[in-house]
Image (tube, grey):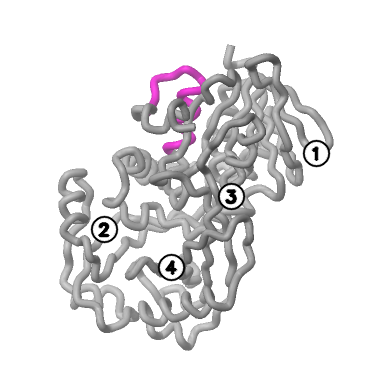
């Protein structure tokens, strides 16, 4: 049955792209639709740390997806690079958290979850990261945390999908509604056309709630604005990711340093603001004083798909046969993508799921 199905995926961010990538070998045809360009929204705008910022503050549901994804990312990066020639740059640098209020909880969580997180002496952090600012007194460290260069990940996934004969991509193609046959969803309506499908997957990030509202369903996924700035430094300037007071600095392999991010409830407004720029610069210089002399080469805003507790919606939509969700990843879409999209494929194809799917099921949550 699955081998002949036509699956339409709404949303061409990392979640939609990776969903398409995982399904393409298993179904007859995949059509991916995006309202703008592939991966130009949250997937492009984020930092790409392959960990929740404070993993111990999340529910076991988020933790389960995060751990699976963290372990899987290196091989995903290698596989995509080998097949496309575009390296997503899964860059293992480790991450230092500085002066945490809940350090004891973090260390207890790490012991319980068997994650390699430990307290380190602040002088050892200064030895490892000489550019870090003074004025910090405590640190914890996890050595195996990577970051992925998210625009490259998008480009690599797009290249991989374009090479597959049964995948069709339509950019600048906004879905405005669903085609129904009684209780069943049998396709989508775009601004210019109708497209029929056996299964429809809603993976439209911050826009998912609005779209599902057209079926009279209230999905609590809403846009949460985040702003970032980018510096250009020498390739060996910053050896590790550092995080303090909710702000972080992420080194890319070529010396670009990302500093983020704000959390703003401004609807669908993505305008970068001067106040955020000044706030991010102040955080950057507090973390790494030498950035006061570095050039800001980029400043942008993106819209995260906010959801209750950051737990994504993965699975069938009750009462609407043929309609599925893979959305609502809030701040952790890049972190959770490999596990979310593998779990999603398992559910759609009727396979044994990689982890217990119950916490993510839309039933009872919308």
Q: Nearer the viewer, residue 271 or 334?
A: 271
Q: Nearer the viewer, residue 188 or 257?
A: 188
Q: Report which quarter residue 120 is drawn in.
A: bottom left
- Mark 1 and mark 3 residues within 8 Å of each other at the beta carbon: no
* Disc 1 versus disc 4: nearer the observer: 1
For mark 1, what is the residue? Answer: 191
Q: Nearer the viewer, residue 161 or 342?
A: 342
Spot occupied by residue 318 in the image (x, y as percentages of width and height): 52, 22
Q: Is residue 110 left or right of residue 50?
A: left
For mark 4, what is the residue? Answer: 251
* Disc 2 versus disc 1: nearer the observer: 1
Check the image and report above or below for 37 versus 319.
below
Residue 38 seen in the current view: yes
For mark 3, what is the residue? Answer: 154
Residue 152 seen in the current view: no
Q: Is residue 178 left or right of residue 219?
A: right
**Is 117 covered by the magenta stretch?**
no
First in sequence: mark 2 vs mark 1: 2
Give me the C-alpha separation between circle 1 and circle 3: 25 Å
* Disc 1 versus disc 3: nearer the observer: 1
Give me the C-alpha separation between circle 2 and circle 1: 47 Å
First in sequence: mark 4 vs mark 2: 2
Give me the C-alpha separation between circle 2 and circle 3: 26 Å
Secondary element type, mark 3: helix
């Amino acid at each position: 049955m699955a081998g002949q199905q036509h699956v339409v995926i709404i949303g061409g961010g990392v979640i939609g792209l990776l969903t398409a990538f995982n399904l393409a070998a298993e179904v007859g045809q995949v059509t991916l639709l995006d309202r703008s360009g592939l991966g130009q929204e949250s997937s492009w705008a984020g930092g790409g740390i392959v960990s929740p910022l404070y993993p111990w503050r999340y529910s076991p549901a988020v933790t389960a997806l995060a751990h699976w994804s963290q372990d899987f990312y290196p091989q995903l990066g290698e596989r995509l690079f080998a097949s496309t020639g575009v390296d997503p740059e899964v860059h293992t640098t480790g991450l230092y958290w500085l002066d945490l209020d809940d350090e004891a909880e973090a260390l207890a969580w790490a012991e319980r979850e068997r994650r390699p997180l430990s307290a380190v002496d602040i002088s050892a952090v200064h030895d490892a990261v000489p550019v870090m600012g003074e004025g910090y007194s405590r640190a914890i460290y996890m050595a195996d945390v990577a970051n992925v260069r998210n625009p490259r990940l998008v480009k690599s996934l797009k290249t991989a999908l374009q090479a597959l004969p049964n995948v069709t991509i339509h950019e600048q193609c906004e879905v405005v509604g669903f085609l129904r046959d009684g209780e069943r969803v049998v396709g989508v309506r775009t601004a210019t056309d109708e497209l029929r499908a056996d299964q429809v997957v809603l993976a439209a990030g911050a826009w998912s709630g609005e779209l599902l509202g057209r079926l009279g369903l209230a999905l609590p996924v809403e846009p949460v604005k985040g702003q970032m700035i980018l510096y250009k430094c020498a390739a060996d300037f910053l050896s590790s990711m550092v995080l303090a007071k909710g702000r972080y600095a992420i080194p890319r392999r070529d010396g670009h340093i990302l500093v983020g991010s704000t959390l703003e409830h401004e609807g669908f407004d993505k305008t970068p603001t001067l106040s955020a720029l000044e706030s991010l610069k102040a955080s950057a210089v507090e973390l790494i004083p030498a950035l006061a002399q570095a050039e800001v080469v980029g400043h942008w805003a993106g819209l995260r798909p906010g959801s209750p507790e950051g737990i994504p919606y993965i699975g069938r939509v009750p009462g609407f046969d043929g309609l599925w969700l893979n959305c609502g990843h809030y701040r952790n879409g890049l972190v959770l993508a490999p596990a979310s999209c593998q779990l999603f494929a398992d559910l759609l194809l009727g396979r044994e799921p990689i982890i217990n799917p119950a916490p993510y099921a839309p039933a009872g949550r919308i």
